[in-house]
Image (tube, rainbow, N blue to C red):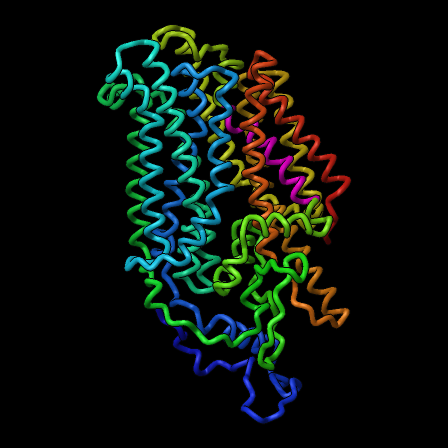
Amino acid sequence: MTLLSEDQSVRPQACRVPEPGKHTSLHQYSTDYSKEDYVDSVDSAVFGAVEPPRRSRGRLILHGLVMFGREFCYAVEAAFVTPVLLSVGLPRSLYSLVWLISPILGFLLQPIIGSASDYCRSSWGRRRPYILVLGILMLLGITLFLNGDAVISALITDRSQKSVWAIVVVMFGVVLFDFAADFIDGPIKAYLFDVCSHQDKERGLHYHALLTGLGGAFGYLVGAMDWGHSVIGQLLGTEYQVIYFFSALTWGIFLTMHLFSIPEQPLDKVSPAPDLSPPSALRLLGSHSNGYGALTKEPVSPVVPCVTDLRPRSFSALGEANSVTSSAKQPNKEAQKRMTFRSLMKTVSNMPSHYRYLCVSHLLGWTAFLCNMLFFTDFMGQIVYKGNPYADHNSTAYITYERGVEVGCWGLCINAVSSALYSYVQRCLLPYIGLKGLYFMGYFMFGMGTSLIGLFPNIIATLILCSVFGVMSSTLYTIPFNLIAEYQREEEEQLKLRGNTETPRGTGVDCAALTCMVQLAQIIVGAGLGALVNMAGSVIVVVLSASTMSLFGCIFIALFIRYVE
């Protein structure tokens, strides 16, 4: 790994360490530099000593292709998991429990896996061994999920035992896939941060976001095709086997290209860089006894107070959140060992009120979104098309249900496209209505759209209203993280105005808290939605529940979310 950039020797140095025994005033540093020179010199001092070499666009795209494959498989899972589970005989009251197991495992095991990858000493690097293992688990999970029923039918002839074992195998495949797909995102992002320079991280995250949207759209598109009467469908057996073929092929090829896209330096060969900057410049993720998100106060050598946020501001949620936290990816080992799930929860409980309110609104939004998205194709098959997933597989009722699922995939494809388009519309609307206005509008449009779908389940109207799903998706992935960035900027400005020398509170723990809300929403949906469907006797309650939660979120945003200029 190249530790020093080629032109570093000719760039001005902002942070100079005085010679021993010589008293040096802070005023004599950098007083004759222009603003641009100062920013450039601080960037050199903070990042120049640890930056890898610049990467080409082709390598960054190859690195991001794994997100296309991951989202492709995610789309297949979201579209077909409920129809597959119901087709193998899972009771209606239990079909939401499959979404409950994976987030619980995430809460328990995510800190362990994240810490283990930081200290992996494989000759292949720190992140790629974990990405490979999790990628294989994803492939195994989707294999069991889409082929479990066919495999059990070939092995077991007893009808009652066949039904039980098919449910067990398919559920295990779904949980395994969901677990691996959720966990693989962390090592992928860490791999990008480890091998890319500060400038390339933003470019890489942009390609990740772009390819994620394209992968989801193509995944839903494959699910929307009628493969049962095609030549490849007759060759492979059933529609699920065709979809599995495309999913496994896409994931296998793009995972391989990702793993060989950019060389990764093994941990044993990484030379520690000298610490030329104050702790606040590189270690923003502290969560210790000095208060919410505060850093342990350590004596440091006299240096010029460096600006802590010199990166260009981005309206991309993925870019914003990961850019904010990327500078905190390599805290010292003692800090990493102290950051446990218990300490994280204690830190969240001590958040300032406006951060807690943001977490609550994020929880309401994701609960509404998941209520609709995880069961939308089943809603299309049962309510809009009036099919029956429990009927015999060669019956008209079941074929009608499958047709509804296919059309539901078209709706989710519309959602993926509208999400990408709306992310650009947000930039135009931002100067006029602000972040809080965009936040409220996203929830309101989703709540009204899903309520109309539930009250008037018409095919054409439902497909048109699927565009509001993309509005909600783009809102959830952008606005909360930008609000966190703005809150952090306000706090830094207030500290400067007061002349306070305190270390700014870390932003990484705020982003982690928002991420926890997504898993908590999935747990709530998995634990409660099945019971609601059983009580109501119809899956129409899925869409109406999403609408209710979203409108509650609108009220909460209007009353509690702090306005930001």
Residue 370, magenta (yes or no): yes
Q: Is residue 541 left or right of residue 191?
A: right
Instruction: Quadrant for the C terminus, please.
Output: bottom right
- Magenta residues, start to end: 357-376
Which residue is at 33% across, 66% downward? 268
Q: Is residue 112 left or right of residue 544?
A: left
**Mostly what secondary structure, the magenta segment?**
helix
| Residue in the foreground of this view, choosing between 331 and 404 | 331
Report which quarter residue 519 is drawn in.
Answer: top right
Q: Horizontal and vertical percent for residue 556?
A: 73, 37
| Residue in the foreground of this view, choosing between 194 and 424 | 194
- Above or below, 290 against 74 in this view is below
Q: How many marks?
A: 0
- Above or below, 68 against 509 in this view is above
Which residue is at 61% across, 27% downward? 546
Which residue is at 54% across, 91% downward? 19
- Above or below, 189 against 499 in this view is above
Q: Horizontal and vertical percent for residue 199?
A: 47, 63
Report which quarter residue 439 is drawn in.
Answer: top right
Residue lying furthest bottom = 22
Q: Horizontal and vertical percent for residue 104?
A: 50, 36
Q: Is residue 398 visible?
A: yes
Q: Is residue 372 visible?
A: no
Instruction: Quadrant for the N terminus, please.
Output: bottom left
Q: Horizontal and vertical percent for residue 501?
A: 70, 72
Residue 550, magenta (yes or no): no
